[in-house]
Image (spheres, rainbow, N blue to C red):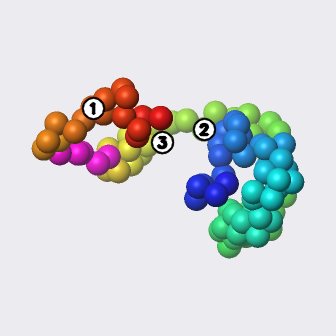
Amino acid sequence: ALSGLDQEMPLGLFYSNVAIKHQMSLGLLPESVIDEKVVRILTPMFEMGLMDRPPPSPEALKANVTSDAHNALARSLAANSTVLLVNRRSTLPLPSNSALQR
């Protein structure tokens, strides 16, 4: 939680309630950090009005909303957000014994 990540999806391996409570009980994770994360996650939801209407039905949550248009948009977003690195000094790939690999 101190690494800058506000939430972990979808599994919550490191941000589970057990892990967070444990870190807080040891004094390693201040409650103020959790408060800041909650504000950053929930504020946009309130601003968009998500809390102003009832939650969708369980049946609606099971609906498959995948479409060709959604897939095309996802591909476009992924392609436009890709960064191509220039490997001028043969830095990549990193050697398996590199400290950055651990």
Q: Magenta part of the protein: which range?
A: 82-86
Q: CA distance from mark 2 to mark 3?
A: 8 Å
Q: Which residue is mark 2?
A: 65
Earlier-in-chain disc, 1 versus 3:
3
Hey, what amino acid is under mark 3? His
Residue depicted at x 29% and y 48%: 83
Tags 1 and 3 in contact by the CB under 8 Å rule? no
Q: Nearer the viewer, mark 2 or mark 1?
A: 1
Is residue 83 shown in magenta? Answer: yes
Assign a secondary structure to mark 3. helix
Residue depicted at x 64% and y 58%: 2
Residue 52 in view of the camera: yes
Residue depicted at x 60% and y 38%: 65
Residue 51 in view of the camera: no
Q: Quick check: 25 above or below 30?
A: above
Q: CA distance from mark 2 to mark 1?
A: 38 Å
Tags 2 and 1 in contact by the CB under 8 Å rule? no
Residue 57 falls in image quadrant: top right
Q: Position of residue 7 (x, y in %)?
A: 66, 52
Q: Is residue 48 left or right of residue 93?
A: right
Residue 44 falls in image quadrant: bottom right
CA neighbours of label 1 inside 10 A, class few (<14), some (14 to 19), many (20+)? few
Hey, what amino acid is under mark 2? Val
Earlier-in-chain disc, 2 versus 3:
2
Tags 2 and 3 in contact by the CB under 8 Å rule? yes
Q: Quick check: 34 above or below 21?
A: below
Q: Which residue is mark 3?
A: 70
Q: Which residue is mark 1?
A: 93
Q: Position of residue 77 (x, y in %)?
A: 39, 48
Hey, what amino acid is under mark 1? Pro
Assign a secondary structure to mark 2. loop
Earlier-in-chain disc, 2 versus 1:
2
